[in-house]
Amino acid sequence: MNLIQEASLMAGKDLRIEARSRVTIRQIIPFGLITLVLFAFALDPDRGILARVAPGLFWITILLALLLAISRAYSIESANGASDALRLSGLDPSAIFLGKAAAIAVELALLEVVLTVGVIVLFNVSVASVGFLILAALVATIGLASIGTLYGVLASGLRVRETLVPVLLLPVAAPILLGATRAWEIGIDGSISDGWPWIGILFVSTLLFTAIGMLSFGSLLEES
């Protein structure tokens, strides 16, 4: 099998497990919606604050949900010696990285669709450029999934991984969080010409972390 086939096999395995357990539907999506509702209560909607800060709140919620998805992805591998079987499977480590990142990206994309509807309804946001928002969300989601997969395996062998992963991941994810937030602000306002530099930041960050993950995932997996 080539790299793409092996990555598809890995992603399919993780997604089938999630489809059977329904953790994304039962836990991660409700978590995201509850977070949005709490933001709506915490801020004053009468002053129009919610509409102005909606992009930032949206991506903060996605980032917090990513932590849950990472914890779930690697708790599966640590159960019943599955991580040892993964190391002995003969799959290319780069393919394992791409597959796990793709599965996390799919879960985040599903959450983003639901949260977008929630933001429009709860925060009274009108979108000027849907295509631009979709492009920014696509690139940012891939970047966040790559970072999550990389730092998830880095901390997977540690007992304190549940607390260590946020400490390691959140500062590194700042460029993608900033780029996605600014791109969404511009996409909502409709001034797309000002948003392409932020899309460029998202592309560069995503390519960088994807490349680092593909190169280093094998050695990190062996140490986990």
Image (spheres, grey):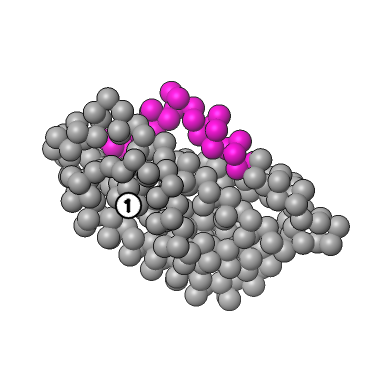
In the rendered image, residue 54, in percent from the top left (x then y), is placed at: 68, 58
Q: Is residue 217 above or below residue 199?
A: above
- Count all numbered tags in the image, as a single digit: 1
Q: In which quarter of the image is the C terminus?
A: top left
Where is residue 214 drawn, in percent x and y? 24, 54
Q: Which image quadrant for residue 156?
A: top left
Q: Residue 11, located in which quarter of the rendered image?
A: top left
Task: State the image coordinates of residue 47 (x, y, percent, origin top left).
Answer: 84, 62
- Please tell me which residue lies in front, 28 or 19: 28
Q: Which residue is drawn at 71% across and 46% down?
A: 38
Question: Which residue bears the numbered disc 1?
Answer: 150
Judged from this view, the residue extending furthest toward the right is 46
The magenta-colored residue range is 8-33
> Is residue 149 visible in this depiction of the protein?
no
Label 1 element class: helix
Amino acid type shown at disc 1 = Leu
Q: Where is residue 77 in the image (x, y as percent from the top left)?
A: 30, 33
Q: Which residue is drawn at 14% across and 35% down?
A: 88
Q: Main secondary structure of the magenta part?
A: helix
Residue 24 on the magenta segment: yes
